[in-house]
Amino acid sequence: MSLPVIKKQLRIAHIHVADQHNKGDVAIVLAVQELLDQTFPGCLIEDFPVEVLKNYEANTLSRLNQSDLIVLGGGGIFYSYFLPFDLKIIKALKTPLIILGVGYIREVGAKALNQKQKESLVHLIKKATRVGVRENYTKKFLVKLGLAAQKIKVIGDPATLLKESKPRNFPLSNKLKIGFNLNYSGWLGFGKWREDILKAYQEVAAYFLKEYGAAGVDFFYLKHHPGEANIYPELKIKGLRVVDLKPAEQKYIYGQLDLVIGMMLHAGVMAFGAGTPEINVAYDLRNRNFAKFIGCPELVVELSDLQHGQLLRMVKRVIKEREYYRAKFVKEKNKINKRHQEFLREVGRLV
């Protein structure tokens, strides 16, 4: 099923997280714009940071309204860090607004959104012409706010569909290849769980060294944020290779691994999109809900279970069943691709 071909050259305002340090945020922007380019060939895309929805600014509003389409997303934009949005600017938008692959974020230990933040979300969703969220939990959250369930489509995370690109000068062996990722990008709860997390990861590395020997396994650290340079040396895994490439190249490397153990949501998303089995250490509701969305809720280990050896038990299971998970991931990714195409086909009818 191919995307619709729109002959008119469109001007699209793309509102998104503008963080260039977080590889997951960059991957989402690239993936969304790839989809837009496929759907609207030759479109002119102008980037806007999500903060433009927080503060009314007349010149910015004018630029938004001069576009043919406004696209918000994807990523964790329904987040206390960005909310509340400004009701005045939402009300003043005249150009059709679509929400594409957006998710709700609530980290372990974080407070629920306050009334003002929720109210701004309700106004935003009501303003949007089409709404596509990345997993079922976000939809349930929005429905609880009183929004119409039929308006909110669950389409998946656009980053799963990011095109891969083989990097130059990054040779890989025929050994078993295990990837690790930690969340050290500003999550305040890391300190509380630090020792449990590091110990659990070290137990996994020790297990593979015992089973395969140093000559039979390679370890990789999958870096998603500069802040992680302050933590991954603490893993003390000998020979750990750091992968810090452009998102499309990073995703290619994910696809060459046998297993990924990660914390950052998009470590799991990119591994899934590349067809590589992944286990996520859940520091946020979104980790659990992504696993549920792809039909693999078992691929999440709770922070409270790390000290009980749950990560190593899960690793032993998944590495034995990795071909099963590879096949399942391909099927689930195809479903996500179909949902995005159907959603964008509807958007194409708006313009």
Image (cartoon, helix red, strand yellow):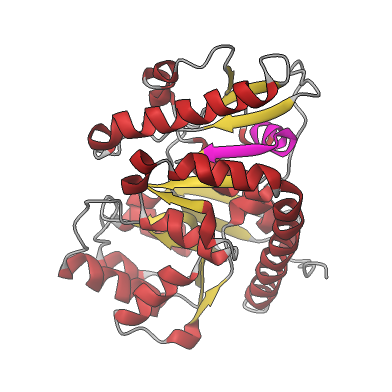
How many numbered marks, from 0 up? 0
Quadrant where the image shows the N terminus: bottom right
Q: Residue at x 29, y 53 (%)?
A: 82
Say which of 126 and 329 sits in front.
329
Say which of 166 and 229 sits in front.
229
Q: Residue at x 60, y 56 (%)?
A: 158
Q: Position of residue 339 (x, y in %)?
A: 66, 71
The answer, for residue 134, to whether it is visible in the render is no
Q: Residue at x 60, y 58 (%)?
A: 11
Say which of 21 and 139 sits in front.
139
Quadrant of the image occupied by residue 230: top left
Say which of 148 and 254 sits in front.
254
Quadrant where the image shows the C terminus: bottom right
Asked if 349 appears above or below 52 in the picture, the reply is below
Asked if 149 appears above or below 174 in the picture, the reply is below
Quadrant of the image occupied by residue 121: bottom left
Span colored in magenta: 249-261
Q: Position of residue 306 (x, y in %)?
A: 37, 41
Q: Residue at x 28, y 36 (%)?
A: 193
Whether the magenta-drawn stretch holds residue 67 is answered as no
The answer, for residue 163, to whether it is visible in the render is yes
Residue extending farthest front? 210
User: Which SS does the magenta portion mostly show?
Assistant: helix
